[in-house]
Image (cartoon, coloured by chain):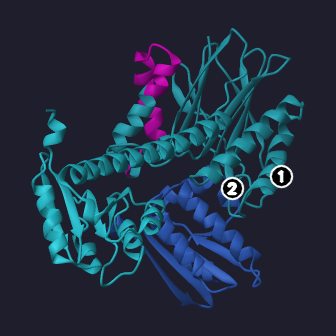
Chain colours: A blue, B cyan
Amino acid sequence: MDELFQVKVREQAGASVVSAEGEVDVSTAPALRQRLYELPDSAKVVVDLSEVTFLDSTGLGVLVAALKRVRESDAGGDLRLVVTRPQVSKVLEVTGLSTVFSVFPSLDEALA
Amino acid sequence: MSIATEVITRVLLVEDDPGDALLTTELLGEAAHPFAVRSASKLSEALEHLHGGVECVLLDLGLPDATGLDALDQILTAAPGVAVIVLTGRADHDLALAAVARGAQDYLRKGQLDTELLSRSVRYAVERKRSEDAARRLLANELLAAESARLERGLLARPMLDTSDLAAATRYRSGGGSLLLGGDFYDAIELADGSVRIIIGDVAGHGADEAAIGVALRIAWRGLVLAGLPAEAVFTSLQAVLDAERPHEAMFATACDATIAPDRRSVVLRVAGHPPPLLIADEVRTVAVREPGPPLGVGADGGWDARAITLPARWSLLFYTDGIIEGRSIDGANGRLGIPGLVRAVPALASRARDLGELLDELLALAEQCNGGPVADDIALFLISAR
């Protein structure tokens, strides 16, 4: 399970960039949630899902919670998603969440 | 003599006086029942020997490294399942009674010990402790099961269908094969004009909070529908209920609301982030919703457009929660069953199932089989069929 999922955090271009890799599901979503919780009150958060091969409803829940927290924080920021794989974009479309998140096709565009 | 009396009872004697320790060990050695006795002269030593099958501790309260009932507390904390009998040297009745009140099974006065009394006390203490623990576990399980059953009744209504031209079947499987419920819910109501309203939903997450909100949403939906609220306004009201009732801001829910026309030849769907139903007729396909609306409670207001679908003369609609498609699969896309895997699997299962319930059982079995065990998320299935 652990070798299938990784999450890294770094600062880039004034944004907190959270890169996830592998499958985000019931067993791995708590790790992603933890890293998102630990972020400083940042105006700009980018969650890079381009290396995510599977995203289930638990993972969506984690992202939605983070989105709300960032938008409602004192910094009044935004949470952007980088999505390149169809497995992930499909899930966002089916759940109608592609209209709720700001979704970008590359990290550069998300950071612009 | 029954076999049970032949089983060795493992005793740990905690006694700092070597003479008393020898005497007690000898008394137990003379008993008809076999005892395996291990000795410790200090509490610290006793704590090291507690594990490894010790069933009963004979505890002298006057140890060098513990005072009063402290030793008893430490032993019961370290090994809650072990039976403790307190040995008192003096006629210290109050201390002995206090020990029993704190969790010791019994107390014995050292000067009055004999083989028969000691043997019987130890064996009774062990049995009594065992049955107490079993009763406690049973009670805890019963409470959990009762709580789950209560929530399950709330989440999974009996469909209010009185019509003879439609048949329905439902199934619910809690995630991970556990007793605990998540927040999947469904309901169906036939209205006075003959139309049938259906909802299936899923509160994101897994646990009693989610289940309680699922119950609230289902009952709110039923109330709104029975009160005659137009279908297009239902999701806005449900979202208001969710916003007001949820224990924390991050909780959201997906739902699919359907209205089947009185003539049974069309259905109107509204989707809030929920997978649309499968239409099972001559062929099996998902009822595509071009732009599904967002889930309830994610901060969006509206966007839950209706979509009308014409139905053939004979049809079934399978409403489901995502637990059924998110289970792993060896041959599915990306290692998961997915909606395409579900669509592929249904025709064969439908043709051999003898009734609606059997088809749902087959689907649950398939998801579990693909996953190689119980699926992690909850699964709710609602199948309705025009005869």
Question: For the image shown, how many numbered marks are present on the structure?
Answer: 2
Return the residue nearer the eye: B104 or B142. Answer: B104
Which amino acid does the dot numbered 1 rest on?
A: Ala
**Residue A68: which quarter of the image?**
bottom right
Which amino acid does the dot numbered 2 rest on?
A: Phe
Q: Earlier in the sequence, mark 1 or mark 2?
A: 1
Quadrant placement of the N terminus of chain B: top left
Q: Main SS type for the magenta part?
A: helix
Residue A5 point in image, percent of width and height? 39, 68
Residue in the picture at 67% in, 66% down: A101
Helix, strand or loop at disc 1?
helix
Q: Does residue B12 appear anywhere in the picture?
A: yes
Chain holding disc 2: B
- Dot 2 crowding, Cα within 10 Å, few <14, some 14–19, many 20+: many
Residue B337 point in image, percent of width and height? 42, 43
Q: Which residue is mark 2?
A: B252
**Is the residue under label 2 in contact with that under label 1 (CB below 8 Å)?**
no
Residue in the picture at 51% in, 21% down: B357
Chain holding disc 1: B
Q: Which residue is mark 1?
A: B240
Q: Does the magenta portion include B352?
A: yes
Q: Does residue B288 appear anywhere in the picture?
A: no
Residue that extends furthest to the top in the rendered view of this protein? B164
Determine the CA span between mark 1 and mark 2.
12 Å
- Dot 1 crowding, Cα within 10 Å, few <14, some 14–19, many 20+: few
Residue B86 point in image, percent of width and height? 34, 64
Quadrant placement of the C terminus of chain B: top right
Q: Does the magenta portion include B56?
A: no
**Residue B67: which quarter of the image?**
bottom left
- The region drawn magenta spans B335-361
Return the residue nearer the eye: B26 or B213. Answer: B26
